[in-house]
Every structure is written in structure tokens, then in C-alpha cells.
Amino acid sequence: MRKLPLLLLLVVGAIAPQTTAAQSADPSRPIVRYHYGDNPAWASPAFDDSSWIVAANGSWPVPAFHSDGFVWLRARVPMASASSRRLAIRLVERESYANAYRLFVNNRDLGGQGGFPPSGQPFYLRSSAVFCLSTETAAPGATAVVALRLWYLPAMRLSGGRGQFEFRIAESDTADATQRASLLAEALGRIPNLAANALLMVVGAGLLIFWLRTRRSELLWCALLLISYPLFECFFDATDLGFLSIPYRGWTLLCVLLCIPTMATTVELIWTVHGLHARIWRRLGHLAWMLYNGTHLLVGSGLVATSFVWWSHTAEIVFLQFFNAITLAANLWVLLVRRYNRAIAAAMSVIPVASGLAAFGWREYRLIHNVYVDLFDLGFLLSGFAIAAMLVRRALAAWRQSDQLRVEFAAAREVQQRLVPAAPPRLNRFSLRAVYVPAAEVGGDFYQVFPQPDGSALLVIGDVSGKGLKAAMTGTLVLGGLQTLAQENLSPAEILARLNVQLVASSGGGFVTCLCARLGVDGSVSLANAGHLAPYCNGDEVSLLTGLPLGITRDADYFEIRLRLNPGDTLTFLSDGVVEAQDIGGQLFGFDRMKAISAQSAEQIAAAAQAHGQQDDITVLTLQFAPAELTHA
């Protein structure tokens, strides 16, 4: 993939010598003379055209922009001396132009294509046709004077270039067969290009299906590009081969409608695949293609003044090159400065380079060994396949990684479910309500209640630092230590101290905040805290000394305080997911809001924090000492 630009340059180098070689003159062709302007008398066989310019190899310069756009061609074509079959003249144009023409043989109008000014409209179609001749038009053995009246749109005159027609007179059956063979040969010459574009569309469709599975936006934009551009190219091929015969205004409109998605998706693909954040340049890229297609539509509409067409055409070229400059600069920035996605950036740089060369005369098809080759198409095809291959490879790697993450996430969820009871236990003289609301990402909140033989209970609530499986496993380690320590009738401070030593020795980094409380049947409460949020008693925050979180250092000290609850008093324990809930404006739920609702139920507190904007796991426990139903019981 990294050698793609070099490969393209080698291919272009092989093409260039063949494309610059001029076609050798065919001595059997009749001499064609041309003259600019318009005069019906020029169709007459008696007109003397000896002063007209001889068309070298049957070609002539397209009329100047500020001219009336007319050019006449004349040639003297010998008729077969003896033929029992009807004769025909075959008219062949070597390039596709939007023009109107009428063919005259010995001053007889045989027909044509498109309309002339002021009300006519030309067609965009290769002017290759067969016109039958009657014996009255041209007798066998005589010389037929063939005249062709041509008119070019201002937009076609701006593009410059040369026109080229051939006049061949033969038996009508032979002319028809030759015409069909010529069209077939041209179609066959385009098959490799059509097949490559068809394959590109298949790849784009595959990327679209792959995007539905992975939802990676870069795959979506690449798929749309690989589908839209081949459609654009097939439209050109269908026109050049004569499958579409439509007025030039309609052709221009279809061209613009097919070009817009190609250019728009190019900008989105570059910014998405490279992760660029320069919004102003991204918007300028979109503005460039909008202006380019807008001016292109004006130029091809034929509805504006001739002088305005010149300015519009100039602006069209400027906007196209501005679009190419932005897309090329973005890829070169990634390739040379950021040094990221270098293979993709190199492949994508080929497209604006080829487009820029096409604007300066490299766009037309070249016939190499009976195969039509176009530099821009070649650059896009090679780049398109390379970009698709690299994106698929990257997406597959990301997909495999996401599968591993999903497995890890599922394992972490399974482990985390063990950190909180399925339902809060029943306690002597206490009514306990608990709510646990996990966040989207697996966190490390936990709480446990251990009833004691003397009727008291040990309550622990905490939060493990970090996310994912590692946090869940650390929580499991804490839970295992608590289950052992809870059986030793230790005070809350002793439990935290012993648990801290175990975590320092085995946690492998990270820390745990933890609040431990022993609840007596007489309403006494002993509290020790290791960096966790303080509880609330009857709506007021409990003041207690806080030690270091568990797992930081072996020398941490923990202190206890004692409370005496009266019947009906409440205690509220919570995790930091409550106070750190954050709305879309970035405002935290905070301690003031928490204090205001701290006397409410666990369900109401959790719902308020969740509605504000949950960012982390939310855990809330509320205890009420000796409520009426327990006292009567």
C-alpha cells in the first residue's frame, strides 16, 4: 500500500509517451477545409473553398470564445464508380462536444443533431452517424461535396481543444456494419474501466454492509465515495457511447447532481479517517465544491450572458483547484507533519493530484492498445481500492479489539454483580433501603451488609478507582477481605486498617475509598472512613475524621466516631456518583443539592442524581432506626 503513489507514477510514465504521439495522417482520407462564421451558401457544391484552411489530420481549433461559435467544414469525397447497392456517408467525430450540426451533401440537407441559436439547444453526444444517400444526391462515380455546419456553446468554446470529423462514403450495409463495429470496439475498449468501476461499487457496497456491523463512520464515507464516483464515471461512458442522448442543459444538471456526493464525501472521508479537527478548513472544503458545482451549472445552462460565462468558467476552475488544494493539503499535513495514517494519506493524495492534472488537459481518454485509459480514473481506481483495503484492515482490527472489550465488559459486569446484594437484608431495629444504578461503563461501586451474632450489623460502602474489569476484580478482592474480617468482631477502624494492609500487598496499584459502620441494636453507630463521602444524619452531614483511601500506604491511620440514633432518625450513605452527576451545561449536582434531599428515600435521591445527568455509578443507602412498624413488631 505504501508503494501506491510510486506505482501510479510508473503507470503514468508509461502512458505519457503514447498519449503525446500524434496520429499519423491517413492519405486515403479526403482533404477537409474549414472556415469560421455562418453562411448558407457554403453548402453549395459550386462554392469555391480553395481559400479555406486545410484541417491537418481532419481536425481544427474550436471557435474562439467571443466568436459566434459557428464553423463550416467542406470536403470532396469520391463516390464508388460502380455499385448496385445504396450508398451512405458515415460521419465520425473523434471527441465528444456539446454542439449542434447539420450535414449537407451536394447542398441537400441530410439531417443533424441539436438546435442552433437563438432558440435551439445542443446535445452532448459523440456525433457519429450514418446518413443514406440517394442517387439524386450523389451519382456513382461522381465526387460528392460534403459540407458540415457546426455550432459550439460558449462553454465549449472556453474549453478550447480541437474538433475532428471524418467523412466516409460506402455502401449503406457496409457503412452500418462499420458503424456498429466501431461502436462495439469503443465499448470493448471501455470495458476494463467499466469493470473496474463496477468492482469499485461492489467494494463500496461491501463497505456499507460492514459499516452496518461496525458503525465506523470512516467506512460509511468511504463506501459512499466508492459508490458515487463510479456512478459519475458510468454516466460519462454512457454519454460518450451514445446510450444517452439528452440536451446539454439536462446533461449538465445530471453531471452536477452526480458530482456533488462524490466531492462532499471526499471531504468527510478525509476529515473522518484522519481525525482532523480544523473545522474552518473542513467548511471551506465543502464551500469549494458548492461553488464549483454552482458555477459549473451556470456555465452549462446556456441561460447567462456570454461575458458572464467567461467569468463563471474562470471561477469554476479556481473553485475546483481550491477544492483540490484543500484536500491535498489535508492529506499532506497528515503524511508529512503528523506522520499518522501515512499509507492512507498517500493514497488519498493521488486523487486531488490527478484531478488537478485533469484540469490542465489530462482528462480526455487515451487509446492504448485498444483500451481507453484516463489518468484521473486510473488514480482514483488505484487509490479507491487501496483506501478501502486499508480501512477494512483497520476496521477488522478494531472489531476484534471491540470483541475483546465486549468480553471483558461482560466479565466485569458479572463480577460487579457480586459487589452489591441482590436485595438489602432485613436488620434488627433498622429499616434499610438501597439503590444501585450502574453507569454505561463498568465502575467499582460496592456495598455489603453483614449481620452479626449479637444482633448488630456491619455496613460497608465504597468505590474502587478506575473502570472496567480491573476495578471489578479489585472490588472482588475487597469483598473477600471484608467477608473474612466481618467474622472477627473487629471495630470499623480495625477493619479498615487490616483491609488496607491486604490491598497494599495485593492490589497492584489503584485505591479504594471505603466507609465502614457498625450498627448497634440500641441505636449506637460507630463510623470509620477511608476517603469516602461522609454520610448524612437527619439531613446534616456527619463530621468525622477521614483517613487515606485503602491501598495507598501501609502506614495509614483510621479513626472512629460514635453516634446515638433516636427512634425515627435516618442515616444516608452514598457514592460520589451522586454529587458528581453533571448536566449538559457542565454543572455538577453538588453537595448543596445533596444536603437538601438527604432526608429523602434512597430511590428519590438516586432518581434526582440520575435526572441531573449520570456520569458514574450511583449508590444510595438509607437507614431509619426503630421505625414504627419495627417497634410494634
Image (cartoon, helix red, strand yellow):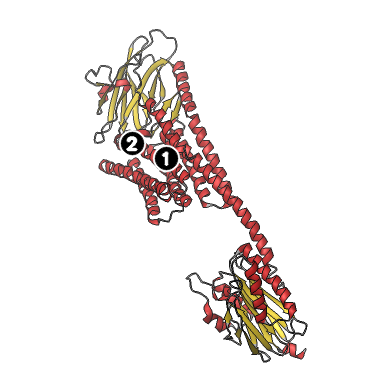
Disc 1 residue type? Val
Q: Please say if 309 is above or below 89.
A: below
> Please, which residue is most extreme toward the bottom here?
566
Query: In percent of the image, x 44 and y 51: which residue is there?
Result: 271
Point out residue 134 in the picture as x, y percentages from the top left corner. 39, 16
Q: Secondary structure at mark 1?
A: helix
Viewer-closest of 20 and 533:
533
Q: Secondary structure at mark 2?
A: helix
Quadrant where the C terminus lies? bottom right
Residue 586 appears in the rendering = yes
Q: Please say if 523 is above or below 384.
A: below
Point out residue 609 in the picture as x, y percentages from the top left corner. 57, 75
Q: Please say if 244 is above or below 336.
A: above
Comes first in the chain, label 1 or label 2: 1
Viewer-closest of 522 and 621:
522
Viewer-closest of 523 and 293:
523
Q: Which mark is residue 360?
A: 2
Query: In percent of the image, x 63 and y 54: which residue is there?
Result: 404
Q: Residues within 10 Å of mark 2 (few under 14, many from 20)?
A: few
Q: CA distance from mark 1 to mark 2?
A: 16 Å
Disc 2 residue type? Phe
Q: Please say if 210 is above or below 366.
A: below
Point out residue 594 in the picture as x, y percentages from the top left corner. 56, 80
> Please, which residue is most extreme toward the top here?
82
> Please, which residue is most extreme toward the front here?
555
Relative to 588, 423 lies left or right:
right
User: Residue 579: which quarter of the image?
Assistant: bottom right
User: Residue 495: which quarter of the image?
Assistant: bottom right
Q: Which mark is residue 350?
A: 1
User: Residue 364: which quarter of the image?
Assistant: top left
Point out residue 281 in the picture as x, y percentages from the top left corner. 38, 53
